[in-house]
Amino acid sequence: MKISLNTQIFLGAFLGIAFGIILGHSPALPAQTNSSILSGFDLLGKIFINLLKMIMIPLIFTSITAGIANLKNSPQAKRIWPTLILYSITTTALAGITGLTAMNVIKPGLGLDTHLFKENMDSFHPHSLTVSEFAHNFVGHVFMNPLAAMGQNNIIGVIVFAVLLGILIIVLGEKSQHFLRMINGFLEIMMAIVRWIMYVAPLGIMGLITKLIAGQNIQLLYVLSKYILVVVGATIFHGLVTLPLILWLITKTSPWQFFLAMKEAFITAFSTSSSTATLPVSLRCITENLNIDKHLARFVLPIGATLNMDGTAMYEAMAALFVANLCGAHLTIASEIIVMLTAMMASIGAPGIPSAGMVTMVMVLQSVGLPVQAVAILIAIDRPLDTIRTVVNVEGDCIGACVVQKLAMR
């Protein structure tokens, strides 16, 4: 009997958890043997990630260009942009409000001994950006040579050029139809490669989750357990209550049906911690399993993977309040609003520099005068939390496509 891809992926995730616990937190095997086996699992994970990264830029470029150009005949096309932007702002704001409410009620970090992290904080030297520097850096990565943007994996630069190209194809009309056919053909080739890559997904996911579980410092997770539980709880609430409620109220789609249809994408997001790397799987699941218009999905999902980051905005806002609790600083309601707005802006396409996520986190802390050195504490626990918020980011993008199709394409 042939085992379905869904079952293979679930089995790979389960085995990854089991192997991670055995290899990382059990003295059953000698350290050298553990290291060699983990190296093999790490290689499996890297092969899968690199395959996804290999097609990520060409897929984003062709999907957005073709998505915009192929929507030209739809009389509802002009409603897509406003609907997508309104949805993104609304869900990101709701995520921030949920996170800040949870932090204010439970207050994790109060009374925690910061001397436990003194070594990490002393050795960490954050690269700070002023608001002006952040703005210039952001603009510099938005408008640039498209080939350079592709070479540097600059997602925002690629998206902007693809949007402009798609619009020009519409404006030029018949003159550009040959080029559009070529783009459509290239996109179909990319989607075929995605189907091939999914054959190795179970092994890749097993390798990634094994490395993730085995590499965690259990003692550190225990010390910060209250904060971790609050972040995980708020993120899951947004992913299992807020977003599904929006989906059901607007589209009348069953959340259970949605989760079943998108489960491959969510497992991939959990194991890769990258919504852009998950994009090929998300596109396949949402068009094949939920019957979302393929042109709409190819336009909405790549943009959402960069601009609509509910989980990231929520986490950065919550992290700022956690640092305030550690320092014994009291933030007013006005300060918390500033934190939330800054986190929302910082989540929209981090600048293309090393440790970009931490740089944007520094910007959020600076917005209300909190010590940026505390980012060192957050780095130590960022990886496991990143897996969950990435799933919510991907979920928000996919629900956004469903909402846009319902509101803008009817």
Image (tube, grey):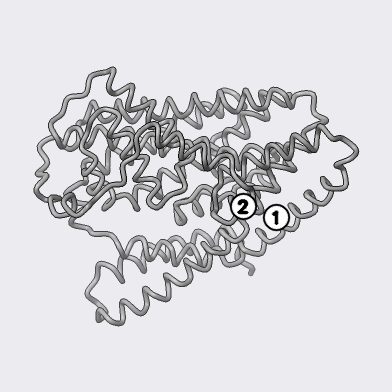
Q: Position of residue 244 (x, y in %)?
A: 51, 32
**Front residue (pair 3, 44):** 44
Disc 1 packing (10 Å; few <14; some 14–19; many ≥20): some
Identify residue type, mark 2. Pro
Residue 281, can we see it?
A: no
Closer to us: 133 or 300: 133
Quadrant of the snapshot with the N terminus = bottom right
In this view, 171 is above or below 125: above
Residue beneath the point at 49% across and 24% down: 90
Q: Residue at x 61, y 66 (%)?
A: 199
Q: Residue at (28%, 50%) from the top-left corner?
A: 379
Q: Looking at the rendered structure, which numbered label has been put on residue 280?
A: 2
- Circle 2/circle 1 CB separation < 8 Å: yes
Graded by Cα atoms within 10 Å as few (under 14), some (14 to 19) or many (20 or more), the crowding at tag 2 reads many
* Residue 50, quarter of the rendered image: bottom right
Name the side, left or right, on which 285 lies relative to 136: right
Q: Locate the C terminus by quadrant.
A: top right
Query: Dot 2 lies on which element?
Result: helix
The answer to whether residue 313 is left or right of residue 156 is left
Give the mark nearer the N terminus: 2 vs 1. 1
Residue 44 seen: yes
Which residue was labeled with disc 1?
Answer: 191
- How far across and down, in percent of the image, does residue 281 sit? 60, 52
Residue 196, position as x, y percentages in the image:
66, 64
Looking at the picture, does residue 404 appear above or below residue 158?
above
The kind of residue tagged 1 is Met
Measured in 3D between alpha carbons, the distance from the residue under mark 2 to the one under mark 1, in whole angstroms, is 7 Å
- Assign a secondary structure to mark 1: helix
Please tell me which residue is depicted at 49% across the width and 31% down the height of the picture: 243
Along the viewing direction, whichever of 63 and 210 lies nearer the viewer: 63
